[in-house]
Image (cartoon, rainbow, N blue to C red):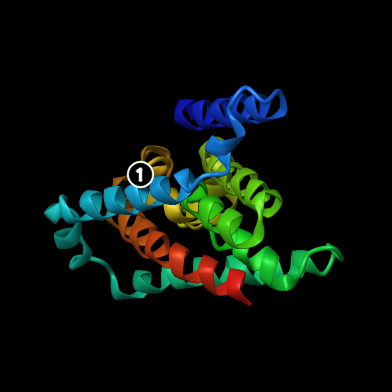
Amino acid sequence: MKGSLIIVAFFVVGTLCGIYQLIPYDLTDSKLSYYALCALMFSVGVGIGNDPQTLRNFRSLNPRLLFLPIVTILGTLAGCAVVSLFLSHRSVADCMAVGSGFGYYSLSSIFITQYKGAELGTIALLSNISREIITLLFAPVLVRFFGKLAPISAGGATTMDTTLPIITQYSGQNFVVVSIFHGFVVDFSVPFLVTLFCSI
């Protein structure tokens, strides 16, 4: 929760800096976001490759739970397609590109900004931050009314890191491996699906 609020605070500060032109224009117009994206992708790869225990834990998964990330991805995209019907100024592909972030706001918003512009990139950032915050705040409610897998699906790509503690607390220790696997698969799909829908 604290981490999410810090991210939102940085976003607000960045927006204010842009409005009041506290940052030189040539800095924002440069390829800085591209280099930041490359560094982010490298860090994700190092994080996954540096934890052999994660790969070992995948082998102990219940085979039926292997479909959970697929259901999360399909459910999110279907929901985005339905929402696009009420947004006449946005295409189905735009809405699905935003949804394809699955809570991975830092990566998806940079991709979308580069492909579709700052406006949709900002929408993606806010949408995906909101997904993480909703999971952190409403995990106990989701478990109570929809079952122990609900906060895992709601968390999207964040279930292997930021929302893992809250999922462990309310869904139970037995779902840690499921949560990590789910986050890993959904996380891995983000750059492919976002670029796919942005290029349509």
Q: Secondary structure at mark 1?
A: loop
Q: In this orientation, which residue lies closer to the viewer: 187 or 123?
A: 123
The x and y percentages for residue 47 are 23, 49
At 26% from the left and 55% from the top, the residue drawn is 45
Q: Label 1 neighbourhood size at 10 Å, few (<14), some (14-19), many (20+)? A: few
Residue 33 placement (x, y as % from top left): 48, 46
- Using the image, determine if residue 45 lies above or below residue 138: below
**Left or right, residue 124 beside residue 185:** right
Residue that appears at 84% across and 63% down: 89
The total of numbered circles placed on residues is 1
Horizontal relation, residue 148 to residue 144: left or right: left
Q: Which quarter of the figure has residue 69?
A: bottom left
Left or right relative to 48: residue 151: right
Check disc 1 and give the amino acid type. Answer: Asp
Residue farthest to the front? 26
Of residue 49 and residue 116, the one placed in the foreground of this image is: 116
Which residue shows up at 25% across the image and 66% down it? 61
State the residue position of label 1.
161
Residue 35: x and y in percent read: 39, 48
What is the x, y in percent for residue 199?
59, 74
- Quadrant containing the C terminus in the rendered view: bottom right
> Can residue 136 be seen in this snapshot?
yes
Q: Is residue 174 visible?
A: no
In the image, is 188 to the left or to the right of 87?
A: left
